[in-house]
Each structure stands twice: as structure tokens, then as C-alpha cells.
Amino acid sequence: MTSQVTYLGDLRTSSQHIASDSVIVSDAPVDNHGRGEAFSPTDTVANALASCMFTVMGIKARDMGVDFAGSTAEVTKHMQADPRRISKIEVVFDMKVAVDEKTRVIMERTAHTCPVHLSLHPDIEKVITFQWQ
């Protein structure tokens, strides 16, 4: 088992990661009857894309002797109606490291191989931008 999700009522859930006991709370968004006091389930999907891309880049960077700690990613999720679903995820990476062009290409290509990126439905538009120092 990976996690256990508990419905808390009022469109809120608590998800406990079994291996680490860490907890994520989610709320329905304000535009869908919720309070918007935490990540919505679709927010976590969009956020997972950036987290996963950073993770696989981190694995590759460690092998290459590159440290990009402190880098950030801005994530923007776009929803559509009928059916209500994620239509587009935009991620802008601000990479806090100066590297050569070859390293940039390797890192960016690696990012696009992350499991979340490969698992998202092809109808979800993914706009990924890298800003390097």
C-alpha cells in the first residue's frame, strides 16, 4: 500500500503516506464548492509534474556533479469544463545554476522523461519552460 486517504467531510481529505507517515490535506477548490484552504486534488497533479521533473533532473545532476539546489518552479494549472478536467499545465523552471549548453540539453531532456510527465493523458497540454542563469 502506498497511502491511505481519509474523507474528513466538507470536501476535504487527508492522505497519509504509509512509508513516511507524512500527511497531505486536500480541499475542493472554491470554484468547485470547496473552501480552497489546501491544494485541490488537481493542484497536486500539476504540482507533481514539477516535483517529478526536479527529481529526475536531480538524479541526473548528481551523476554529473551539478548542484541546482535553490532552483524553483512556478506551476500554473488550467481547468476546462464539460468534462471538468485539467486542460493545461504550465511549469516555468528557474534554474539557479550556470551550466554549459550540453548540460542544459541533458537536464531538460531528462526532465521530460519523468514518470508523471509520461503518465499524464496526452490531451493535457504541457508547457515547460527553463530559465537558466
Image (cartoon, grey):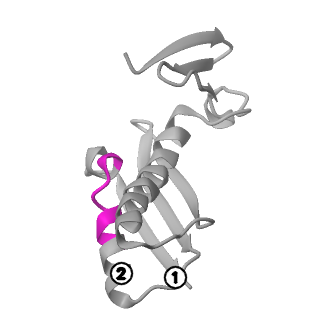
Instruction: Check if residue 12 falls in the magenta segment.
Output: no
Q: Point out residue 63 in the picture as x, y percentages from the top left corner.
A: 35, 65
Q: Give how far across and how far down residue 60 sits, in percent.
A: 35, 64
Q: Is residue 115 magenta?
A: yes
- Most prominent secondary structure in the magenta stretch? helix
Query: Which type of secondary structure does the marked residue at label 1 adopt?
Result: strand
Q: Is residue 93 above or below residue 116?
A: below
Q: Amino acid at mark 2?
A: Thr
Foreground residue among 60 and 121:
60
* 70 on left or right of 41: right
Q: In screen coordinates, is 3 left or right of 7?
A: left
In the picture provided, is 40 more to the left or to the right than 80?
right
The numbered disc on residue 132 is: 1
* Stretch of the chain drawn in magenta: 108-116
- In the image, residue 74 above or below residue 104: above
Q: Amino acid at mark 1?
A: Trp
